[in-house]
Image: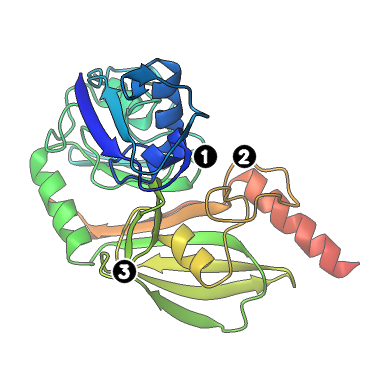
């Protein structure tokens, strides 16, 4: 257990004060620590809605993180391609890519470990074996994993050098007037919410190429090609130009017209040079039914 000492910069609820302090503790985590009796002011434990005065000293006892160990699990995989070096899978919406706090199992990594046995690269450690790149939990579509370290290094180099293809299809709010555009805005952690990303001056370069596929008046279907691959890149970039992705509760509209379980964002195509042969390979994946059903509803509305 480690103790973090803070000084309240302003008067307000203690969970918010802790979250805004820059200590890397989210507001929900701060509230949980308060409920567990791990937060005190002047030696007295306080509740999450305690109002602390500006200048007061706050002590936060943060428990050591419990180690997470990925274990093989017999979870069905939609395998698009597989050989001795790589495996390309079509990840469903709602599946987390690798174990983490709050998602210790049931992930794509657990499924890959069961399917591939010991044949996964170990470069990213025991929690993320084989994982070269990720897609969000509520984003569906294609992802390539490496079955050995040589393949991992080769694929990672292609991503770094911007030679790998990653093409997404998204339904966004609003009518995009341009047929094509490029969004070049740096990304970094949102200083107000460390679980989210934001356009941050001095952040990491992030470039997304956008092409309009179909217009529905209040909505636009777009193709997004990643030049870089930052966390939440497409979601933040589209929201930054006023066209958030439909179903994106973190960066988009809170109350959507459609009943969705996540954003309408699908990794539709992936391409790379095979790490062993150098052969150019490209794979594609059709939109999931909940996505196509939404599009058909919009098309029917236009025909009325």
Q: Which sits earlier in the primary sequence, circle 2 or circle 1? A: 1
Q: Which residue is mark 3?
A: 227
Return the residue at label 1.
93
Find the distance from the CA under tag 3 to the CA under tag 1: 23 Å
Relative to 247, 74 lies left or right: left
Local crowd at mark 1 within 10 Å, few (<14), some, or many (≥20)? many
Q: Are marks 2 and 1 in contact (CB under 8 Å)?
A: yes
Residue 277: percent from the left, percent from the top?
A: 13, 54
The answer to whether one can see residue 127 in this image is: no
User: In what element is the residue under mark 1?
Assistant: loop
Reply above or below: 18 against 99. Answer: below
Seen from the viewer's position, the closer of residues 50 and 216 is 50
Tag 2 residue:
261
- Label 2 – label 1 distance at C-alpha: 8 Å
- Residue 81: x %, y % from top left: 34, 43
Q: Nearer the viewer, residue 39 or 68?
A: 39
At horizontal 42% and vertical 22% (from top left) the residue drawn is 34
Instruction: Indicate whether 167 appears above or below 41.
Output: below
Q: Quadrant of residue 191?
A: bottom left
Screen quadrant of the N terminus: top left
As helix, strand or loop, the secondary structure at mark 3 comes to loop
Q: Is residue 213 visible?
A: yes
| Few, some or many residues within 10 Å of mark 3 (<14, 14–19, 20+) | many
Q: 10 Å neighbourhood of mark 2: few (<14), some, or many (≥20)?
A: few
Residue name at image x 41 percent, y 51 percent: 192
- Outermost bottom residue: 178
Q: Quadrant of residue 88?
A: top left
Q: Specify which label sits upstream in the sequence, 3 or 2.
A: 3
Look at discs 2 and 1 and give the one toward the viewer: 2
Cα–Cα span, label 3 and label 2: 27 Å
Nearer-the-camera pick, 112 or 201: 201
Q: Position of residue 185 (x, y in %)?
A: 36, 72
């Amino acid at each position: 257990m480690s103790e973090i000492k803070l000084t309240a910069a302003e008067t307000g609820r203690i969970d918010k004060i802790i979250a805004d302090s820059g200590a890397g503790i989210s507001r929900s985590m701060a509230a949980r620590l308060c409920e567990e009796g791990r937060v005190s002011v002047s030696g007295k434990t306080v509740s999450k809605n305690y109002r602390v005065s500006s200048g007061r000293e706050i002590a936060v006892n943060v428990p050591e993180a419990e180690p997470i160990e990925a274990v093989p699990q017999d979870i069905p995989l939609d395998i698009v391609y597989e050989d001795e070096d790589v495996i390309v899978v079509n990840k469903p919406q709602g599946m987390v890519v690798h174990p983490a706090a709050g998602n210790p199992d049931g992930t794509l990594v657990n499924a890959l470990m069961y399917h591939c046995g010991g044949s996964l690269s170990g470069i990213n450690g025991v929690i993320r074996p084989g994982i070269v790149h990720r897609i969000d939990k509520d984003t569906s579509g294609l992802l390539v994993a490496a079955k050995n370290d040589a393949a991992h290094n080769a694929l990672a180099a292609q991503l770094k050098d911007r030679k790998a293809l990653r093409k997404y299809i998204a339904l966004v709010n609003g009518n995009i007037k341009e047929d094509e555009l490029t969004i070049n805005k740096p990304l970094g952690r949102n200083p107000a919410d460390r679980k989210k990303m934001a356009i941050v001056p001095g952040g990491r370069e992030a470039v997304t190429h956008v092409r309009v596929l179909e217009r529905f008046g209040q909505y636009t279907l777009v193709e997004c090609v990643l030049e870089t691959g930052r966390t939440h890149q497409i979601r933040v970039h589209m929201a930054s130009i006023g066209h958030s992705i439909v179903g994106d509760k973190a960066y988009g509209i809170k109350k959507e017209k459609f009943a969705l379980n996540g954003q309408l964002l699908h990794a539709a195509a992936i391409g790379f040079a095979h790490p062993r042969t150098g052969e150019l390979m490209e794979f594609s994946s059709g939109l999931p039914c909940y996505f196509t059903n939404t599009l058909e509803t919009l098309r029917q509305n236009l025909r009325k």
